[in-house]
Image: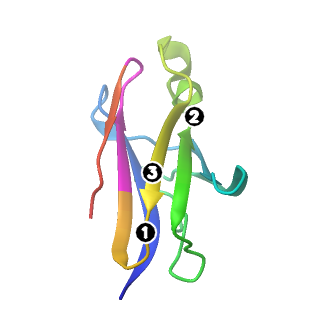
Amino acid sequence: MKPSALTTHVLDTAAGIPAAGVAVELWRMEPQPMLVTRATTNADGRTDAPLLTPETFQAGRYELRFAIGAYFGAAGGFLDVVTLNVGLAEGQGHYHVPLLCSPWSYSTYRGS
């Protein structure tokens, strides 16, 4: 069985740069919502440590919350907090969830 972990990466598609300083929260949604961890993206747009490591990983439903409104600030963006709901399973290897965003839109995918 492959060890599982969860990481993220935030890219500012309006400026074409990594989004540094974005506050990220990870919530486990089962059986009741519970905050797992908080992190802030670094100069590369990544968190300094995985949100879930192989040692802390538990399969289930999770919610990632990205405070992009605070990041874009004076740009007068439309979005405040981007929320992604994901299902994580044991043995599926590394989960990487990039967020590509601008003040007005976002997209995501399961990366590697």
Depth check, front residue: 61 or 54: 61
Q: Is residue 60 left or right of residue 107?
A: right
**Magenta part of the protein: which range?**
97-104
Please say whether residue 10 is one of the residues in the magenta stretch: no
Q: Which residue is mark 3?
A: 86
Identify the image quadrant of the N terminus: bottom left
Q: Residue at x 35, y 30 (%)?
A: 106
Identity of the residue furthest to the bottom in this view = 1
Q: Earlier in the sequence, mark 2 or mark 1?
A: 2
Identify the image quadrant of the C terminus: bottom left
Q: Residue at x 42, y 20 (%)?
A: 103
Q: Is residue 31 left or right of residue 41?
A: right
Depth check, front residue: 29 or 99: 29
Could you tell me the amino acid type at mark 2?
A: Ala
Q: Residues within 10 Å of mark 2 (few under 14, many from 20)?
A: some
Mark 2 and mark 1: Cα distance apart in space: 26 Å
Please tell me the numbered disc located at residue 89: 1
Does residue 22 appear in this view? no
Q: Nearer the viewer, mark 2 or mark 3?
A: 3
Q: Residues within 10 Å of mark 1 (few under 14, many from 20)?
A: some
Q: Which residue is mark 2?
A: 67
Does residue 38 appear in this view? yes
Describe the element under mark 2 as helix, strand or loop: loop
Name the quadrant containing residue 100. top left
Tell me residue 82's x, y (percent).
50, 32
From this view, report whether residue 28 is shown above or below residue 83.
below
Q: Residue at x 55, y 47 (%)?
A: 63
From this view, report whether residue 59 is shown above or below residue 31.
below
Describe the element under mark 1 as helix, strand or loop: loop
Please say whether residue 100 is one of the residues in the magenta stretch: yes
From this view, report whether residue 49 is shown above or below residue 42.
below
Describe the element under mark 3 as helix, strand or loop: strand
